Each structure stands twice: as C-alpha cells, then as structure tokens.
Amino acid sequence: MLAGLPRGATKGPCWEPEFVNRLHQVELIESTAVTADVTRLVFSAPEVAKLARPGQFLHVKVGGEDAFYLRRPISIHDVIEDRMVLLVRRVGYGTNWLADRPVGSAIDLIGPLGTGFDSTLAGAQSLVVGGGIGCGPLLYLLRSLKVRETPGTYIVGGRHAADLFSIEDFSSVAKDVLIATDDGSQGHKGLVTELLASELNDTSRKYEAIFACGPEPMLKAVSAIAAEHGIPCEVSVEALMACGIGVCLSCVHKAQVDGSTEYVRVCKEGPVFNTRSLVWGN
C-alpha cells in the first residue's frame, strides 16, 4: 500500500495551482567545475529562491526544447539572495547536457519540490553528515543552521581527497569540519561513519540532532548509530524519479506508517525522512 497518496492522484497534481506556480525558466549565470566530474551551476532564480527550503530538490528538464528525456531531480545545494546553486555530477546524457550548458542559457525546471529538513530539531549542537555527491543539499542546511545561531559540525567522506569539494564553502557555515577518506589521502583514514561514531562517543559533547545525505549504505549505518545513541536523525534519500511530483510511484521507499509497513514516495513525502520511520533493505 502506498502511504499518503493524495486525492485525485489519477488526475495528478499538475492541475493544482501549487504545481503550476512552481514551473520556472531560470538563467544560468555561472558554471564552474569543482572536481573532474562535478560542476557547480548558479542560476538567477528569485522566485525559486524565495520558496526553497533546505533538503528540497528541483526537477530539471534536460536535452533542449524538443527533447523527451525525463527530467533530472537535483538537490538544492545553496541559496544566496536571489541565486540558486546546484551541484551536477556527470553520470550520463542528461547530467552531461546540463553541466555543459553555457552561461546565459535558459533552463526549465519545476520546484522547489519535496519535504526538506526539519532544522528545528537542531539544538545547541548538531551533526551534518555527507558522503559523495550526497553532500549536495547539506550546504544550504548548514547555512540555515548558522542563521539560526545553531551552527552544525560537518562530517564529510569520500573515496579519496579528489572526491571532496566545496570544503571552503562548508567551512564558512559550519562550526567544525571533519574529513574522512577511504584511502587516508585527507583526514581520517576510513569510513565517514567511523568519524561519526567517534564524535558521538566523546562524552564532552552532547549532540541533539543528526542530518545526513549520501549513498544508502551510509544512511543505513548513520541511522543505526543515531538510534544507538538515542539522537533524532533525518536523512535525505536518493532515488530514481520519473515525474517528481508524486504521481508515477517510481521512487517509493519502505517505511513504518501508523504501525504498518507501507511505501512512501521519496519525491513527495521525502526526500527527507526521520529515520524512525524508514525500513532499510538488507
């Protein structure tokens, strides 16, 4: 059974005013390669920036006006005044097309979409954990925590130092930045979850919330560590999407809803979930 399916889902939310108001044409004003396969795109998007919340995503059209490719869901990396920042990893036709757009291009997108992080969970101290391109939505989250005067400690992991990006940007909004790499080329040698466990085992600190985004094995491990320490935890789940607005049901994830196991839509009920509700695969 699918949890939270809206009334009239067979007709779809594209007739609802809220959806229509989130169709935008935005202008690309800056494009910068931050690693060999990750590009930072900055758009002039005042209407989107005004609505956006940390953890939400944009559904971006790729391939030009006459293309029939599916849109790509991309997390909002940052919002600075009326500018919207995205990180795009080159993995196939759609992301390569988007990363190669010249400055001045008009991009068609829907958003912001989805449920973002509940930053009110954060108290005096919180941990923000990222892995790989999953670090994408965490800069905007950390910026919002700093604005609320509850800056978070950022823990980031990658296979090696070349995988890490935007560390200076994260350092400007985080209380501390802790780094783990699989090969030990920068920071702690090992998994990012090892750094997380070490930080939580330090009795001189008392963390009140954990936020995370990254590959599912990492999120599953973060969830288990948070449960062990009795700390509220929210994670942003990655999923393949088709419609991005809750109709096609291609992005469902198992969850506990009112005591029973059901499926929730990552694009609609998520992508951010409290880990108390999620059911992880083996």
Image (cartoon, rainbow, N blue to C red):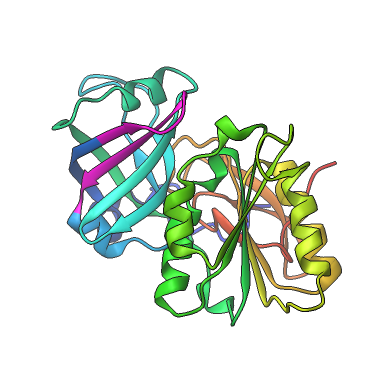
Residue 172, quarter of the rendered image: bottom left
Who is closer to the viewer here, 187 or 40?
A: 187
Provide residue 221's location: percent of width, then percent of height.
Answer: 79, 51
Q: Position of residue 267 (x, y in %)?
A: 50, 49
The answer to whether 23 is drawn above or below residue 50 in the figure is above
Q: Which residue corresponds to the image point at 71% horizontal and 62% vertical from the top-left? A: 275
Q: Is residue 60 above or below residue 54?
A: above
Q: Per the image, is 32 magenta?
A: yes
- What segment carries the magenta color? 31-45
Q: Is residue 212 left or right of residue 79?
A: right
- Taking the image as drawn, is residue 279 in sight? no
Membership of 171 in magenta stretch: no
The kind of secondary structure the magenta stretch mainly shows is strand
Q: Position of residue 245 (x, y in %)?
A: 42, 48
Residue, far left: 104
**Residue 176: percent from left, percent from top:** 57, 63
Quadrant assignment for the C terminus: top right
